[in-house]
Amino acid sequence: MFSRAARNASLLSARVAGTARLAPTETLPPQLGFAPRRLNATRLSPYHTLSGTKVAKALRDEAFKEIETIKSEHPDFEPTLKIFQVGSRPDSSAYVRMKLKTSKESGVRCLVEKLPQDISEAELLNKIEAVNGDDSIHGLLIQLPLPKHLNETKVTNAVLHTKDVDGFHRYNAGELSKKGGSPFFLPCTPNGCIRLLEEAKVDLRGKNAVVLGRSDIVGTPVSSLLKNLDATVTVCHSHTKDLQRILAEADVVIAACGRPNYVKGEWLKDGAVVIDVGINYIPDSTKKSGQRLVGDVDFESAKHKASFITPVPGGVGPMTVAMLVQNVLLAAKRQLTDSYKPAKISPLPLKLQSPVPSDIDISRAQTPKNIGVVAEELGIHANEVELYGHYKAKLSLDILNRLKANENGKYVLVAGITPTPLGEGKSTTTMGLVQALTAHLNKPSIANVRQPSMGPTFGVKGGAAGGGYAQVIPMDEFNMHLTGDIHAISAANNLLAAAIDTRMFHESTQKKDSTFFNRLVPKKKGGRQFTKSMLKRLEKLDISKTNPDDLTPEEITKFARLNLDPTTITIKRVVDVNDRMLRQITIGQAPTEKGFTRSTGFDITVASELMAILALSRDLKDMRARVGRIVVGANQDGEPITVEDVGCAGAITALLKDAIKPNLMQSLEGTPVMVHAGPFANISIGASSVIADRIALKLVGKTKDSNAEAGYVVTEAGFDFTMGGERFFNIKCRSSGLQPDAVVLVATVRALKLHGGAPDVKPGQSLPSEYTEENVDLVAKGVANLCKQISNAKQFGIPVVVGINRFESDTDAEIEVIRKAAKEAGAFDAVSTNHWAEGGKGAIGLAHAVVDATKQAKDFKFLYEVDQSVEAKLETIVQKMYGGAKIEISPEAQQKIDLYKKQGFGNLPICIAKTQYSLSHDASLKNVPTGFTFPVRDVRASIGAGYLYALAAEIQTIPGLSTYAGYMNVEVNDEGEIEGLF
């Protein structure tokens, strides 16, 4: 009946012109002035021409006015369409020009990217994926037809369904075909047909509608739209019998069969409404081109029977592009509306047990959400997520650029009082707090925590996922390897160590400067050039030449010879294991090293300066610069030698380019957790990364003109406030430019009893009775430590909430002593929590207090200014944080301070490495010691990380293993599950 070739040509014409709109039933946000449109009903009138040209112009004008109205309140609002045109078919180019013209007239920005005819499918799909993740582009259209080597179905379905303004994606097509479905967009040509019927004021309910053609572009979707409007629909095709009889009973005819002038007027019912979708060319000698455009309906005969009829041209054609513009506008309005919505996180239910099982059993009993779901709930785009299995992912730093206009969410720091060796539950409190905020108060929140080292995991301390019913899951994946960031740090650090020793070896064994220079800058293909690091070294040496052949012999010597003094080298090799036997080693003992031996040692990986750099870098560029600034030692003249001088900065950054991306996991109740970086708390900041905080704050933040409540980012600082908290403010906040809105100080009855005079506690040993029985007097004496830590935190001008991490043996009377003392000391609030046993439910009170605290006024200030002298900064920390009387700097430490000042490093913030078990340098001095002299035994420099660190005593930077260590409990069962972690 229908010519297949003709039908396909017609449908192809509709397709290349086509695109989409939205379901008629969708109601849009009233604050943007959108209103649903309804189909009006009236009695059919005598013959009228349905001019698509007029309706399309009205739609364009309407779109332009609406865009201008929205822009008056949202100046950045700019609906944007992206078109990919593969090849240069003349018909495709004509359609693209038409879309460009219509978009411009409607106020829609249209970007056309012309791609070569032979582009590979993979390359095209990658381009589509990039646009899918670009929030500045609201609609994406693939101009059809595509060259034969490209799979049209696969390509069109690669377009994100929320940007599929053509309406071709299987999601939109499938939703349209379902009863009660909700497609994001309607295909443009079918939607244009319905809009013309609306203009004719045709009441379709109960009417007989006949659709000629069953293509996926017009026939099938328009039949679905008609059915949704309660018409009785018959779809006819090339195998339909008795077509004329069917048409004679039709109230509405939509012709999309691809046969010129096929439907005759005598076939039609009197008063029928005819929508002609056909685009066909027939010979016409009167035309300059020799042909003219006609539809599938014989207009001259049909107009005498029809009440309404669309002309060709000037009927459906202009409507198609007009509906495309409407779809793009709709997509932009949706995005604008969505930007005001807070992240919606669906919590996981907890099945609490008593007594509380082991951490690993609790973790394994919970079924986590797929990490892709967690990312989606946070509004993270698919192209910004790199999956590592089902429950871990890395996040792209591109999120920062996409959300740069957002205001930050609320920023909360969890720190602690001076702890016992058993720890007081900062990580557990951090997890309990976010679980309470999100799963119980319905407030978006993200916990940002450090990645644990496997040294403590297999040593005495155990993992760092939190505990009980407030932890990161899966805890085995969290505590072991994660996504390999620590291993990347190890590889990068050890590459640097190898590069340093190798450079000294080659300089010592190659005596002639010119020969060494020629090997250092070798000729390749007849020429040679300096590397990026070499050019930076030349700049440092005030040598302006960039051609290696132009250097004088003196400049060659100056450039090539680092002349490192082996006794000044600070870089050690690293390993993520507690291996005490590596604390001091001798390298270079093989005969091949020609007697070049050196005494050195290993650090644990998290003590590497590269880990601190990972934590403090703002982005990849900043990390590259910081790596280059690392001072590895000094030359024979006492001048600092950097990683840039060694020529290793680029390679190190390359090894860390994935490690700089934060890791996404989840809590036991399905709330998001970012895990990133894990600098050693003894000699570094002991906090998670600046990058993770920046991304998280944007994700839970809000647009500037939104009235919605911002979400919360909760992060923690290692050890007690005088260490982790003070460094967080004075070092991390200086690096990030961020300011917390509240501080949570974690306290326990157990720790305060210790400070009140109870016997010492030791890991692995039973607690003395003083800790398991009520003793209000001990608590009352020990609260002075809490009060001092409250005072310490308040010095930074931030509200303080005390979280009392309750244990089973704690009594109400003991808790009340703490609560009362905390309030009197200036805490905004003090709340008892039981999140270890109850999850987020046990921290609801704390969550309410934190929410209220973040609403309080703050007067943020640093403890000291960086341009003060090193000695003054040290004294300020000791006197204001620790309560000491003065400092005593050893001659060795003073010599280094003087050297750092001479080298230009005196204006850096200070980190003090001391015991965490006392406010002072002496672990035996409990509670609030005063009047002591604080010793500074040594001062070292982490120039790349951006601080100096002073040592009050010798700090072991690679721990050892105990006789009975954690690794002894670890097993893998027959199902491949890890057991014994804690």
Image (spheres, grey):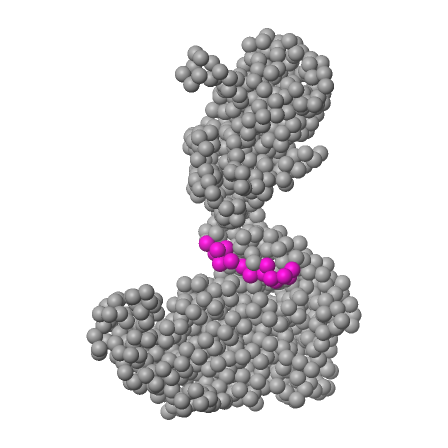
Residue at (68, 60) in percent of width and height: 368
**Residue 226 locus on image (x, y percent):** 66, 26
In the foreground, 920 or 14: 14
Figure disc tally = 0
| 559 sits to left or right of 601 | left
On screen, 267 above or below 361?
above
Q: Assign the C terminus to one quadrant of the image.
A: bottom right
Is residue 165 in the magenta section? no
Residue at (34, 85) in percent of width and height: 509
Residue at (48, 67) in percent of width and height: 656
On screen, 696 above or below 55?
below
**Residue 902 locus on image (x, y percent):** 30, 81
In the foreground, 966 or 924: 966
State the residue lying farthest toward the right: 354
Is residue 391 in the magenta section? yes
Q: Is residue 161 visible?
A: no
Q: Is residue 112 visible?
A: yes
| Span shown in magenta | 387-401
In the foreground, 178 or 498: 498
Residue at (29, 76) in percent of width and height: 517
**Residue 463 locus on image (x, y percent):** 63, 75
